[in-house]
Amino acid sequence: MDTTLIIEAAYFVAALLFIYGLKRMASPVTARSGILVAGWGMVLAVAVAFLYGLDVNEKAQPHVWVNLTLVVIALGIGVGWAWYSGKKVAMTDMPQMVALYNGMGGGAAAAIAAIELFSGNAQSHGIVVTILAVLGGLIGAVALSGSLIAWAKLDGRINKTVRLPGQQAINAALFFLALATGAAITTAGLAGEVSITLVAVFFVISLVLGVMLTNPIGGADMPVVISLYNAFTGLAVAFEGFVLQNPAMIIAGTVVGSAGTLLTLMMAKAMNRPVSNVIFSQFGETDDGGDSEIEGSMKAAEASDAAIAMYYANKVIIVPGYGLAVAQAQHKLYEFVKLLQKQGVDVRFAIHPVAGRMPGHMNVLLAEAGVPYDIIFDLEDINEDFAQADVAIVLGANDVVNPAARTKKSSPIYGMPILNVDMAQTAYVVKRGQGKGYSGVENELFYADNTSMVYGDAQKVMAQMIEAVKSLG
């Protein structure tokens, strides 16, 4: 059989697997199988790449076997590292891992662009392919360095948010300088004069741009950043797919880019921030006048009192946040929920789109504990139910339940849709201390008349609640 036909058929099947896998990821029930389907599509695409290399390059490049051996070694290292880190990573570190792996995808696209531009292969295919190689290299390099900064912020390796005077002017200058350098590469390459120095300068500028774009952004806004760079990576991969004339890369990159773009729009909407502010680092900045004196005081409550109140309630809504993930208390929480359900309590979970440190963080956390999907609701589906809830309990969330977002125009989170925890008859907040949230904004919910604070690590608090409920039986 013709090798070319086999390659094209395999890429077509891989593309179908990518799309079908993404479709199944739309539902929590089928998401796991969707990931496996898309993964097998990637395995097929990688395997066919070896066949493509043998078919096209064996005669033209005598050292093809050496190159393929190096590829196998690289794959072995990559698979081994990914398998080990994937098994070892804690749920609290999942956002860092996602940011890091996303950066690797952007870096791979940038590396392809660098090779194609260095060698002159891209230029030999004409101006359109050359432009796509340059754009893919720019976007991939920005995604790489930007994702690394996001990883360092999420991992606590960078704790300061530095905003230089004229930050946006500097970013704009770097962006236009990168475009100008890319245009010079395109022009010189088409004339048959590939300048290695010029290509190197282009990628250095692109990497610096990624750092400068991400460094001013506060850690609380990292979910949007991760989503944005995911879209960047997909776009870069799609562009480089055109350069290599690889259908699988084009389709996979387009799917990732479009999905990442839609997710970014949803995340920005959930934070009430224009996408332009996301791109130009307007968000994550705080207003010094945002924290004024809040009336009332925090009232402490025992974990046992909160547990008993929920045990005798009709309807309870639980709001999980990053503190739940830090404490690794999701299993204890679900054990407590099952005790409430056995008593006949209607228990539901309310998920804010930007809860946690990455898109879908809380959904993954609850799925790991085995919480049924049919009691997990998004903000728009459950927000009206808080007014009918006897008890709402918040575990480690902050900004997404702050009523200041509705009323205080001076607050940096003003206008952001929040979960209406303050409208429940009684609210409990499980929190390790009296500090502010990740964004640094004081939470008015903590001072409300119907709110009590349960101080302590969520793991220990949930264990105390379980014991209190069991003692009633």
Image (cartoon, helix red, strand yellow):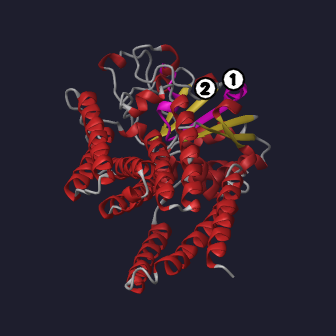
Helix, strand or loop at label 1? It is helix
Magenta segment boundaries in residue numbering: 383-404
Q: Is residue 392 visible?
A: yes
Residue at x-position 72% and y-position 46%: 340
Amino acid type of the residue that numbered disc 1 sits on in the rendered structure:
Ala
Q: Nearer the viewer, residue 47 or 392?
A: 47
Query: In the image, residue 382 lies at what x, y percent?
Result: 69, 32
190 in relation to 264, above or below: below
Considering only order in the chain, which callout, 2 or 1, is on the residue closer to the N terminus?
Answer: 1
**Total numbered circles:** 2
Q: Is residue 9 left or right of residue 100?
A: right
Query: In the image, residue 13 lies at what x, y percent?
Result: 69, 66
Determine the image quadrant of residue 46: bottom right
At label 2, counting other C-alpha atoms closer than 10 Å, the crowd grade (few under 14, some 14-19, many 20 or more) is many
Query: In the image, residue 466 lies at what x, y percent?
Result: 62, 51
Q: Residue furthest front?
A: 191
Residue at x-position 31% and y-position 43%: 183
Quarter of the picture holding the N terminus: bottom right
Q: Is residue 394 magenta?
A: yes
Amino acid type of the residue that numbered disc 2 sits on in the rendered structure:
Asn
* The label number, if any, that marks residue 387 in the structure image: 1
351 in relation to 60, above or below: above
Residue at x-position 49% and y-position 48%: 235
Q: Assess whether mark 2 and mark 1 are in contact (beta carbons under 8 angstroms).
A: yes
Query: In the image, residue 396 lies at what x, y percent?
Result: 49, 41
Q: Is residue 158 visible?
A: no
Q: Is residue 338 left or right of residue 169?
A: right
328 in relation to 290, above or below: below
> Which residue lies under the disc numbered 2?
420
